[in-house]
Amino acid sequence: MVFNLRIGEVHAAAIWLLVIGEAIKAIVQDKTESRETIVRLLKQIESEEECRPIQRTVKAIIAAIEQGAEGIYAACLTITRFLEFAFEYPPDHSMASRLYLN
């Protein structure tokens, strides 16, 4: 997916994936938000995204999350590998956490 995106799109994808990663953490840690609410939020993100490759990736991550623990692990791995491959460094989770909370 990374090779099919322009620089700005890669940055946008990274931000969305970091935010989705924070949402996944909330699901795993069983915070006040329910899984259904978070999945609904992620579906809204997917529907509003104009870039088709990003939209397809978010849709696949949502489908994985809905499958349970193994899907959640696969979604986290996908996000991590995308960020490592695209930027060659680990993601800044504190920024993602702030974006998710906003």
Image (cartoon, rainbow, N blue to C red):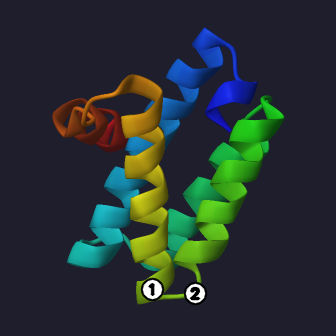
Circle number at residue 91: none
- The local secondary structure at tag 2 comes to loop
The quarter of the displayed image where residue 66 is located: bottom right
Which of 94/60 is in front?
A: 60
Residue 39, x across and y down, in percent: 56, 67
Seen at 38% across and 58% down, the residue is: 23
**CA distance separating discs 1 and 2:** 7 Å
Q: Residues within 10 Å of mark 2 (few under 14, many from 20)?
A: few
The answer to whether residue 36 is above or below residue 23 is below
- The local secondary structure at tag 1 comes to helix
Which of 78/43 is in front?
A: 78
The answer to whether residue 60 is above or below residue 57 is below
Left or right for 62, reference 59: left
Q: At label 2, which amino acid type do we have?
A: Gln
Left or right for 36, reference 21: right
**In this rendering, the label closer to the viewer, 1 or 2:** 1
The answer to whether residue 62 is above or below residue 53 is below
Residue underneath mark 1 = 70
Seen at 29% across and 42% down, the residue is: 101
| Circles 1 and 2: CB atoms closer than 8 Å | yes
Residue 68, x across and y down, in percent: 48, 88
Which image quadrant: the C terminus? top left
Seen at 49% across and 56% down, the residue is: 78
Circle number at residue 67: 2
Seen at 56% across and 32% down, the residue is: 13
Note whether residue 61 is visible.
yes
Left or right for 60, reference 102: right
Q: At label 1, which amino acid type do we have?
A: Glu
Residue 31, x across and y down, in percent: 24, 72
Residue 43, x across and y down, in percent: 67, 57
Which image quadrant: the N terminus? top right
